[in-house]
Image (spheres, helix red, strand yellow):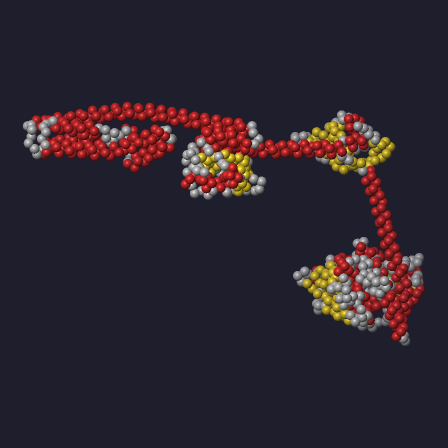
Amino acid sequence: MCHASYRPKGDACAVRWRRRQHAVEILSGDRLPAAEAKDEMARRRHFAGMAVVRPLVLGVLMVGLFLLDITTPLGFMFPYGYVVPVSLAVWLPRRGATLVVVGGCTILTTLGFFLTTGTPVVPPWVDATGRVASVVVLWVTTAFGVQWRRAAERLRKVAEQSAQEVAERRRMQEALEAQNTHLGLLAKAAGRLVLSDEPGELLGPMFAELGAGLGVELYFNYMKGPTPKTLELESSGGLTDEQRKRYHVLHFGELLCGAVAETGKPLILEDLQHSTFHGSDPLKAVGAQVYAGYPLIAHGRVLGTLAFATSRRPRYSDDELRLMQTLSDQVAAVIDRGELLHRLKESERAAQRHLAELQSVYKTSPAGLCVLDTELRYVNINETLARYNGASVAAHIGRTLGEVVPGLPESIEPLLRRVFETGESSMDHEYRMETPAQPGVLRDWISSYVPIKDPAGLVQAVNVMVQEVTRLKQTERALREAGLALEEADRRKDEFLAMLGHELRNPLAPIRTAVKVLDMQAGRSPEARQTLAMIERQVAHMARMIDDLLDVSRITRGKMELRQEPCDVVQIVRDVVHDYASIVSGNGLALSLSVPEEPRWVEGDPTRLSQVVGNLLHNAVKFTDAGGRIEVRVDEDPPTNLVSITVSDTGIGMDAAMLGRLFETFSQADRSLDRSRGGLGLGLAVVKGLVELHGGDVEAESAGPGKGSTLRVRLPLSAEAALAAPAPSAPAPRQTEGPLRILVIEDNHDTADILQNLLVLLGYRAEVAYTGPEGIEVAKRLRPDVVLCDLGLPDMDGFAVARALRALPATAGSYLIAQTGYGGAEDRRRTLAAGFDAHMTKPMDPAELERVLSSVADMRRERPRAVARRPVRRSA
């Protein structure tokens, strides 16, 4: 018979779906325990089978009774046999089935009266009466059956409801017991974890309890390893020693625990034996059916993993999973707390070490240290400051600053008060005072004041550092005095070098001029001319050594000044090579020049650049024997925007050691005793200094001794210099006026007379004055075009003479040339400021003097005398 609570509702699909859901809920344990769910499912299958069989049985029974009724006359009582199917129909699951059956039996009873084929046993009216009575009985039976069935269903429902309530109470009681068990396990675990600094030591005992309470057979606790992205097995349960050793270290993403660590999310795997999840093979090998792994996370950091597995059942319940999750969270929190406590302990130990170190430093510091409160009383003080103050440490504590050190400067207390008021440090205050430790002795001190604040930012005390700097101050004063002495010595050295150059140049001036005069006079024999050429070379050599010595001194002291202007490097090299052509050929050497057709402009001092090229050529001539060859090149390197000047020779060459010190002062390749090459070894040092002042560099190359040398200077090209370069001037017309009138003012009679002779031989009108006043008187009469004036005149020096000449109308437009043995930049500035137009250093080069005088003559022809006074100033 069908159970009343399973009566069909709605369409067949909905009924089947509800039955399936009900069966799943029962089997899953959500409604009934497992045994009752099994019985209920069997009962439902029985009812489902009866729902199909009963209608068939009733149909066969009704048809059989009908056939017997019409074929075999059994009397008027036979129709009462239809009571059997009607009684059975009352219990059909569908409510309309009973009416169908009773109606069918009524129809069959009626048809049996008319369709009977046998000989009637009773009269027809008896048969008809019996059939009517049987129909009544059928319907009465149906009515009573339905009422009975309804009463039975009500009783069954009451019984089922009572059974369900009992089952629900039992299920709730079991759930509460399981929950209490879980809470007990969790509380016990939490209590142990909270009291433990090392949770790994407690997971073993906890696992034993979990195994009993949850049926957990395996657990694994991995923690992050010392290397990035690795895990180390901290503790485990249910593994053999071999398995623990094999899986002791995992990488993130390796096996299940590594996957949990990599994703930072829990991983639950059911029916593990049929799982295809990567990394589950080791657990399959031990027969595990379900795995639950959880990351141990604290403050967003993965500290490790905690995983559980069992082979006893295919899944964990939701309560068990929540328990495992909570337990994992607690383990993570305890591990994080343990790490924090470990760091705090380490910090505490470090702080204690630092405190001990600070206390040790405070006590043993060579500087005086103390702490003053708001009333300027000593709170703490070290031995050094106590010794400075002439009292013990104990004698300071609690006493004010003024009580301990009565002679303290008045400025100290306001400084301390300002620190308390502003909360800002006050550093490095210097003062001199006596102390009780050494009364009557003034000592130098330096002190600093740093505020000590509470958490609210209020200044509670001031940390004072005091250090005696008496010896330091004495040293500073000594150094300052030594510096002044050095400056004075340097000044005296400059004066000495300048005076030395002046005194050495003065005797050379008449000699060089006399050589030129003798050379210009006719009738000299070849031997005499050869002697004059030798004298000229030696004078030039002596002048060059003096210039190099003074230039090196200026460069090393940073006093070399450049008069920079746009310079054509190509033209400078051409001019210098032209000047040196006779010297090169006179030494039996071949000279070649290779330069671009177009100018190459740099920003520089043309005089100093000419000196650089001249020194390079002079060096090549000096170290190349007769028959050798010298090559001069000018090249441009567009990628680096540099122009290079290269001087190569086939001379004596040099080794690698010499190359390394070639540009040092007093450095020479020829160190033989006879010093046949001569010189001071300053020329290339001057080259290096001048080139670097122009922003360039210099280098030397040599294949070795006897294989020649190459010296190369590189200078930066300047687009601005090219734009500012002067336009080429047209050639000056030839002189048509009379010769220049030149006045020589020189106290050295030899120099003055020989210079006058040279000027006369050059075709100029020259007169001489030996003193400044005499020169002024001669100038008034002569009205000179050019005045050559010595600066070191007695009584009235050259500067005063220049100012006087500029004041005279007759000489206001004259071209004034200063001639002196002083060639420094300051000397040149002074001469130009005094009114001179040019500065020429003794001994003057006659060729250079002739070029200057020729330019003056050209300018006199181009414009009137009154406005032709100041051409571009130059020095030689």
Residue 303, x across and y down, in percent: 54, 37
Task: State the quadrant of the C terminus.
Answer: bottom right
| In-front residue for pair 391/709 | 709
| In-front residue for pair 784/253 | 253
Q: Residue at x 67, y 62 (%)?
A: 638
Q: Quadrant of residue 112?
A: top left
Q: Total of numbered circles in the picture?
A: 0
Residue 808 appears in view: no
Residue 310 appears in view: yes
Q: Residue at x 84, y 68 (%)?
A: 847
In the rendered image of this protein, does residue 320 appear above or below residue 253? above
Task: State the quadrant of the N terminus.
Answer: top left
Residue 217, x across and y down, in percent: 46, 33
In the rendered image of this protein, does residue 209 appear above or below residue 428? above
Residue 673, x across and y down, in percent: 85, 62
| In-front residue for pair 255/528 | 255
Q: Residue at x 59, y 33 (%)?
A: 340
Q: Quadrant of residue 107?
A: top left
